[in-house]
């Protein structure tokens, strides 16, 4: 009897395929990193074909490790980096440009123009989102205006748009679909109706013919007919942070989780009615299971947390592996008055400052690389504290426990510092509580 489930986890830095048994325990996984492409300051791109190839390789490797075959899997789901924008040719299947990553800021000037002529929150009532370079809509506009013939192809439905869930689903099943959680991050979907909002499509000059069909987060989208999972049912789509909300079983209003990854993202379930933020947070779809009503969430999105550690590793060569930052940071008793504001892509929640850029402050001749390492970890915790305070203001709910996940939660120094500056607010790491 089939008793396994597969999950494609397509993230900002890498792609994983994980196989779970019927009790929900992982039995095998494989992971492939992909290139981060920086053509200009503030521009961040991924190669969609490289990512697709990594998906196939990770699947093949994980199946081999588990000694399993496609018929052993009951179904597969996809979770993905959100907002990252792909435009491809329907006929050839080839991308018309590298994917524009969610961190990319090349549309800052477009954002500024809209803000001058209507304010940053002019679309918030319809989408739950402020105007910022973070979301997909203006990225798609840039692609349509920049790539020769792209607009004509999009007008006729021969160029297709999607976030990474749509790109992978189309390549695996041939279906051009997305789910409500990913659609809610384009700034093109009406947050109440969960349909594409024509007034915003007009404002951003986006032709409807290039857009995917919006579906729920849990249903059968199709049978995989390409790659190593041929014959397996694709039955789940969720943006990565919403997937963490579901994975942490935050199904009741007021329950919240924080993911410490490339960025950090705190989501609180607000029930079946969207709650508009007045404290700099985002209103987003949390999940929708089949024909049930969608559940909404408030989100505090932080652009740079784990990416700051990667920057210290790759650009400044301060250590060889990301895990080594904890040893280095723990070698000094405090930050030596060094503070970092990692605004590599501006500042996200709750400040939404497009023009902010990163700084390292408080440097003296006393400071060394260990103080900088410690300041980098503390920068993550301080940003999360800002979002927790905003969440309390918006929701009127004082969190009693913060469920956490993501690659950085293995850093005990960071997690303990986080608990300390939340004034002994308990942090739940799977089955461990920090005070």
Image (cartoon, rainbow, N blue to C red):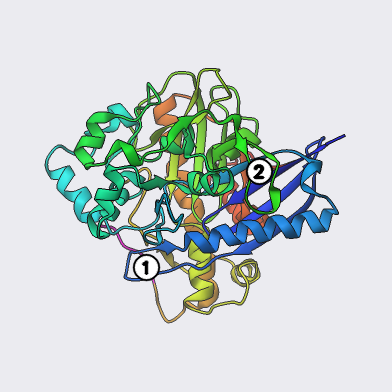
Give percent across and percent down for residue 329.
59, 68
Q: Nearer the viewer, residue 211 or 321?
A: 211
**Residue 138 seen in this snapshot:** yes
Side of 315 relative to 425 (left or right): left
The crowding category of the residue bearing disc 1, from other C-alpha atoms within 10 Å (few below 14, some 14 to 19, many at least 20), is few
Numbered marks: total: 2
**Residue where numbered disc 2 is placed:** 435
**Residue 135 seen in this snapshot:** no
Q: Alpha-carbon distance for marks 1 and 2?
A: 29 Å
Side of 59 relative to 325 (left or right): right
**Residue where numbered disc 1 is placed:** 361
**Residue at 47% from the left image edge and 63% from the top image edge:** 47
Q: Toward which corner of the image does residue 231 lie, by quadrant? A: top right
Give percent across and percent down for residue 373.
53, 69
Over which residues does the magenta segment extend?
A: 355-362
Secondary structure of residue under mark 1: strand
| Magenta highlight: main SS | loop
């Amino acid at each position: 009897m089939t008793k396994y489930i597969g999950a494609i986890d397509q993230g900002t830095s890498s792609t994983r395929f994980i196989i779970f048994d019927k009790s929900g325990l992982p039995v095998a996984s494989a992971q492939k990193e992909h290139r981060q492409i920086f053509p200009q300051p503030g521009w961040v791109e991924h190669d969609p074909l490289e990512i697709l190839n990594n998906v196939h390789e990770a699947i093949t490797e994980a199946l081999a490790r588990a000694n399993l075959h496609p018929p052993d899997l009951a179904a597969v789901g996809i979770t993905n980096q959100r907002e990252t924008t792909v435009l491809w040719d329907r006929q050839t299947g080839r991308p018309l440009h590298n994917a524009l990553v969610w961190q990319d800021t090349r549309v800052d000037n477009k954002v500024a123009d809209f803000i001058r002529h209507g304010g940053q929150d002019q679309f918030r009532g319809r989408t739950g989102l402020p105007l910022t370079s973070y979301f997909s809509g203006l990225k798609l506009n840039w692609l349509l205006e920049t790539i020769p013939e792209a607009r004509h192809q999009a007008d006729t439905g021969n160029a297709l748009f999607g976030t990474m869930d749509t790109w992978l689903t189309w390549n695996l099943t041939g279906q051009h679909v997305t789910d409500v959680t990913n659609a809610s991050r384009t700034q093109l979907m009406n947050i109440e109706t969960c349909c594409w909002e024509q007034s915003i499509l007009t404002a951003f000059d986006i032709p409807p013919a290039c857009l995917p069909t919006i579906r729920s987060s849990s249903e059968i989208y199709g049978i995989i007919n390409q790659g190593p999972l041929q014959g397996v049912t694709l039955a789940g789509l969720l943006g990565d942070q919403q997937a963490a909300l579901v994975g942490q079983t935050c199904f009741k209003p007021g329950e919240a989780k924080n993911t410490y990854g490339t960025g950090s993202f705190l989501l609180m379930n607000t029930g079946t009615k969207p709650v508009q933020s007045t404290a700099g947070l985002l209103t987003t779809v949390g999940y929708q299971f089949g024909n049930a009503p969608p559940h909404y969430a408030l989100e505090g999105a932080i652009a740079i947390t784990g990416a700051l550690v990667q920057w210290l590793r790759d650009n400044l060569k301060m250590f060889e592996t990301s895990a080594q930052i904890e040893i280095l940071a723990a070698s000094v008793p405090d930050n030596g008055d060094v503070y970092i504001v990692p605004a590599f892509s501006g500042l996200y929640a709750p400040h939404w400052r497009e023009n902010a850029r990163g700084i390292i402050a408080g440097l003296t001749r006393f400071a060394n690389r260990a103080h900088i390492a410690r300041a980098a970890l503390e920068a993550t915790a301080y940003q999360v504290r800002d979002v927790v305070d905003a969440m309390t203001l918006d929701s009127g709910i004082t969190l009693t426990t913060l469920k956490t996940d993501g690659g950085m939660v293995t850093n005990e120094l960071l997690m303990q510092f986080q608990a300390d500056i939340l004034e002994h607010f308990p942090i739940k790491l799977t089955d461990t509580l920090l005070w």
